[in-house]
Image (cartoon, rainbow, N blue to C red):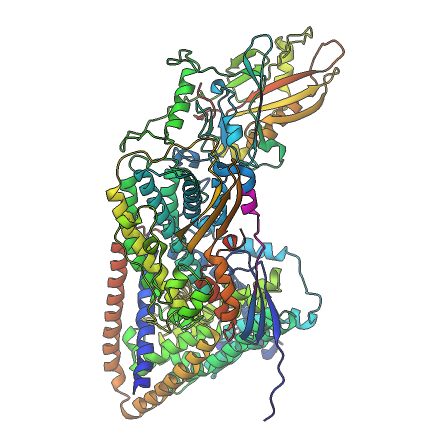
Amino acid sequence: MSTLHTEEMTLNMGPQHPSTHGVLRFVVRADGEVMREAIPDVGYLHRSIEKIAEKVGYHGFMPYTDRVDYVCAMFTNQGWGMACEKLAGIEVPHRGEYCRVIAAEFNRIASHLLSVGAMAMDIGAVTPFTHAIREREMINDLIEELCGARLTFNYMRIGGVAWDLPPGWREKALAYLDHFDPILEEYNALISWNKIYIERLANVGVITPEEAINYNLVGPNLRACGIKWDIRKDIPYSVYPEFEFDVPIGDGHWGKLGDSMDRYVVRIREMAESSKILRQALQKIPAGPVLAKVARNFKPPAGECQIRLESGRGDMGWYVVSDGTGYPWRVHVRTGSFAAMGIIQKLSAGLMIADLVTLIASLDVIAPEIDR
Amino acid sequence: MSAVSEYIGNIKDAVTSIFEGMAVTASHFMRKPYTVQYPDRMPVRVQDTLPFRYRGILEVDLEICTGCLACERACPIDCIVIVVDKDPQTRQMLLSQFDIDIAKCMYCGLCSEPCPTGSIHHTTEFEGADYSLESLIRRFVKDPVMAYKPKKGPETDPQIAPILFRGLNYLSEYQVSGEPKPIDAPAVAITRTVLPPLDVEVVAGDKHSKIHPGSNTTKLEITNDESSAATLAVASNAAERERITDAPQASYPLLAQHMNVQGSVVLQAIIGADGIIQDLHVLSGPAILSSAAQQAVRAVAQFDVEIPPRSATLHIHISHAPAGRKVRHFRRDR
Amino acid sequence: METLVQNLIASGAFGKNASPHMVAALVVFIMSAVVFLGVAFPFAGIVSWAERRVWARIQSRVGPNRVGPQGFLQWLADGVKHVCKEDIIPDESDAPLFKMAPYLVMLAFTLPWAVMPFSSSLILADLNVGILYMTSVTALTVVGVLMAGWASNDKWSLIGGIRSAAQIVSYEIPAGLSIFPVVLMTGTLSMQGIIRAQGWAPQHWFLFANPFTFVAANILYISALAEGNRTPFDLPEAESELVAGFATEYSGMRYLFFFMAEWGNLFIIGAIIATLFLGGWQFPHVTNNVIAMNILQAITFNVKVLFLVFVSMWIRATLPRVRIDQLMTLCWKYFVPISFVNMIGTAVWVAIWPDGTTIMGYIMLAAAIGLGAVFTQRVIYYLRRSRMEVYFNPTI
């Protein structure tokens, strides 16, 4: 039988699309349902945030860091704070570190909730998304009481945090955690262990550990391949060494190791771990100030520094070069989503178009973080 | 055989997991929805349910502004414009302009932190949508005012003391560096005075008076603003007042009524020598009321003015509250 | 129907020289108009409102509740909005096919109402191949959907249309095969005949007649959902991938036609299952008044169908969608063999032990009640554990 002459379609999964997480574009070369290649096209959300840092100065840049990754705003705040503190040699008070960890872990739960919810919605189940958003709204209520905003928090400052925990907040936070743990189980019963869902996610977008390291993946994407690497444990910062928590990794239980199901389950388990950390932190929080004394016109000594922290999306790196004035010379952010975009092109060969959506969702790509 | 067992296992997994999922969703049928049906099916205004630290639209209490420009310097986005000069005669700092562009503002809170008295602060207002971009520039200075000079001891002026108390209380939420805050400090309640249902506050120049009309109408009292030789026919004679009040009234915007929004809209009207309004624009005030205020002023077809041949600038301050409702004035504690 | 028409002609209501054929045709037209315009289309619209309310409660939300009492006029508002929209025909598209596609899909939705057995005498046409007619005309959607996908001149629509065509055609097989057990047990394809062969009590329904029909009912329900493009099989209109699949290029009322057909199909799916397996309009004989009996029977039928519609909405809110290859695997590797087994099992059952149906009915009913009890226990478990406020009132 002679080979059938078929043509390849070039589709555009454009910047406006219901399921690319943010403004992303993919040029898809497909042979019917099966893709040959999906070429990502980023840059639609570039806002020159790193350049803006050179204009607004150290203190003024803190609200801009919220916008780098608005889902994980506490981590970006913390990153900028840590970078400037390292440059100038400022030590954050102990209670301030605890406040940072509490805020950050709540943000991690909120970020993962959004990620798993959006993933479920991309797969087709509409209910888990609203449930996840409902839980996220409760966390947002808590954080709103803490710092006044629900998304772009601007909670942390160079040298600590801006506000202490309000009276009664600790009890509310603990009550929320008591509410959250059974809800997580219920969420799992609804969607995570659903056979259709597992069938959609297992064996899709398998990333081997070597590939993951070569392509610079970080965070849950990396841990799902079986590599136990978490900045909180391996390059400890802040007060994380004082807490007991586990780092969940993928185990290939539902399909091959490193598939989308592993990435999804790692996020679910990380939420449970964050809940553990939060309980410990809320119990053990010491008394004291939350903000170190930092000059209004902050002029760190000339030099450069790099810090890494574990954000919702993985190892976030902040690199700051200072020239001794009140304005940084160069700021650079290295985010996990940018690395994840690189691997999509390679993984997409042989996937179906429906699987491309699954892949993007499982890598938890947030567009503003890619382009900054 | 493993293929058969896998086959049957698949069916069993599918049935049990879908069964569990359906049970979860069925349990949700019987739970209360989490939705807050804003804005009409709320027992209280949403603005009153927001936490104290909520970073809403900015507001400035000029009575306690010291003119230190700390907020202008702190703002990363340059949305605050303050003009403060030393008055040559009285040797005091005079604030002549304090504009905040709430369209540019990113509600980061960096300006309210360094304020020494808590004059610039975030309110819980978040509804700022309007049709014109200009009305989003809030101009807080109507006439040049003296900057506040903080006293060494407690503030004695009874008008300013409560404002200062509120401001310092707002500031105390921020962590002052180096000083620990007690963990379980009791929350301080901010009392806000409630204005009686109807209140018309007229400010023109140095004159400042309150009128309590008995019905839901707007009265304008127009006086001159400059201490110059210009004399204006004050609309104090009955005939003139009657003419103004009989002019077609602007109706209170329905949405503002629903949301219990009241406030002061500061308009600047340039009235020609013939009494016809040549220019009318909004300087500041709740956007939701601005169009009604403009309508109310325009409803007065012709102002009766007697002046030497030049036009005078009037500041007409209209405050309007719906009849019979208790309103809470969120802007000023008077 | 026929007797009514003959009585009317005999009584001279239409004049002395009335031709029976013309009168019959007139009556049929009027009845069809009443059924289609008065029942089918409003139902399709109301289902959209009901679906949104049901979904909303499942998702901890409220759903439309402003337009009209409890938001009941939302579907009218949506309809008016769609009518007022600009009718966009894409430039390079095949305009006659593009315009005709929604009408074909609507046709596939409208035609089955002719054999819908609302009660023992309320049926437009009691064909003796009723159920066969129903399954065949619902397959007309394939033509409409394929036409829509192709004529849109849009690659994404094309993918959606082709997926849908493959899906509907594939799932016709298990659906048809699952009808056979019932036909084997009754020996007739007519809708009224099948209903009359069942009783009003649950143990006399074909659902519980023997385990094969129970499985066949489930397979028929799932296959009918797949044919109606409902989640978990809504790939053709997978919102997150293809925006709206084959209907992407459509706007205004044309777009709404596709979705009215989908929502209205829910009723048809429910009607097929209710007729074949749930006893249709069967109601205990409580009165000799024919009209009262008919009304009670119509209510029974509608209650059963509406319950199944509700279950369809509930399933749609709960389950994710399957991928196209998994859908095909499910159909050909799971449903088709199981349907064959059902058919042969029922044939053997009818041949060997036809009287066993009554005993088996009680046993199966007890098993089903047990399953329901387990389900209720799980529901209460989740309700208790969640610590969320219990609130039964559907009108919020």
Residue A185 on image: x %, y %? 29, 59
**Residue B318 occupies quadrant:** top right
- Please state which of residues A127 and A336 is positioned toward the viewer in this rendering: A336
Q: Is residue A97 visible?
A: yes
- Please state which of residues C65 and A6 is positioned toward the viewer in this rendering: A6
Q: Is residue C39 visible?
A: no
Please identify the quadrant where the C terminus of chain B is shown: top left
- Please state which of residues C358 and B164 is positioned toward the viewer in this rendering: B164
Residue C25 on image: x %, y %? 59, 75
Query: Does B30 appear in magenta?
Result: no
Please identify the quadrant where the N terminus of chain B is shown: bottom left
Q: Is residue B222 left or right of residue A247?
A: right
Looking at the image, which residue is at 37% across and 47% down? A104
Residue C374 on image: x %, y %? 24, 67
Q: Is residue B161 left or right of residue A356?
A: left
Residue A159 on image: x %, y %? 39, 37
Up-down: is C340 above or below C383? below
The residue range painted magenta reads A40-53
Q: Is residue A332 left or right of residue A285?
A: right
Up-down: is C339 above or below C281? below
Looking at the image, which residue is at 36% across and 65% down? A227
Looking at the image, which residue is at 33% across and 82% down? B7
